[in-house]
Amino acid sequence: METAPEDPNALTNPTLLVEVRSDSTELFDRGKKFKDDQRLPSLQHYLRVHQDEARVEHYCRNDDNTWTLSSAEVGGAVRLPDLGGDLLVDDLYQAIDRVRS
């Protein structure tokens, strides 16, 4: 892992980015910001977690540097074998519901 000199808590070579979807920033997040994030050579997985429904979008970098989009909803999972397993949507939103309570 490499950290930014000005912020030791900020990685400069992430393999996974997770973003919580927000209506107020949706256009920016899906546009320039996502294009900038895709330029990170280390980035392999980009997850967009929806806050208003149990849904996770997963962008996965392919060997030819293109990206494949899949989504998972209630009862589904985001497959992340190269990161050690799967992210179960139900578990993620159960944890979010506990935080909201």
Image (cartoon, rainbow, N blue to C red):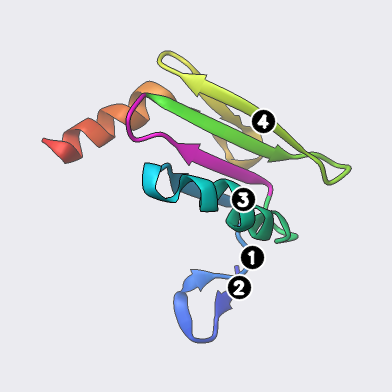
Residue 14 in the image, given as x and y percentages of width and height: 60, 59
Task: Based on the picture, tell me whether residue 45 belongs to the magenta stretch.
Answer: yes
Q: CA distance from mark 4 to mark 1?
A: 21 Å
Asked if residue 59 is among those painted magenta in the image, a careful observer would answer no
Q: Is residue 86 visible?
A: no
Q: Which residue is mark 2?
A: 2
Tell me the CA gap for discs 4 and 3: 15 Å
- Amino acid at dot 4: Leu
The quarter of the picture where the C terminus appears is top left
Q: Earlier in the sequence, mark 4 or mark 2?
A: 2
The residue tagged with tag 3: helix, strand or loop?
Answer: helix
- Quadrant for residue 9, please give it: bottom left
Q: CA distance from mark 4 to mark 2?
A: 27 Å
Q: Amino acid at mark 1?
A: Asn
Q: Which residue is mark 3?
A: 31
Amino acid at pointer 3: Gly
In the rendered image, the vertical position of residue 99 relative to residue 88, given as above or below: below
Nearer the observer: mark 4 or 3; the answer is 3
Q: Nearer the viewer, mark 3 or mark 2?
A: 3
Q: Are marks 1 and 2 in contact (CB under 8 Å)?
A: yes
Which residue is at the front of the view, 47 or 92? Answer: 47
Q: Reading the chain from its start, which is encountered first: label 3 or label 2?
A: 2
Left or right of 46 on screen, residue 100: left
| Residue identifier under label 1 | 13
Q: CA distance from mark 3 to mark 2?
A: 26 Å
The residue tagged 4 is 69
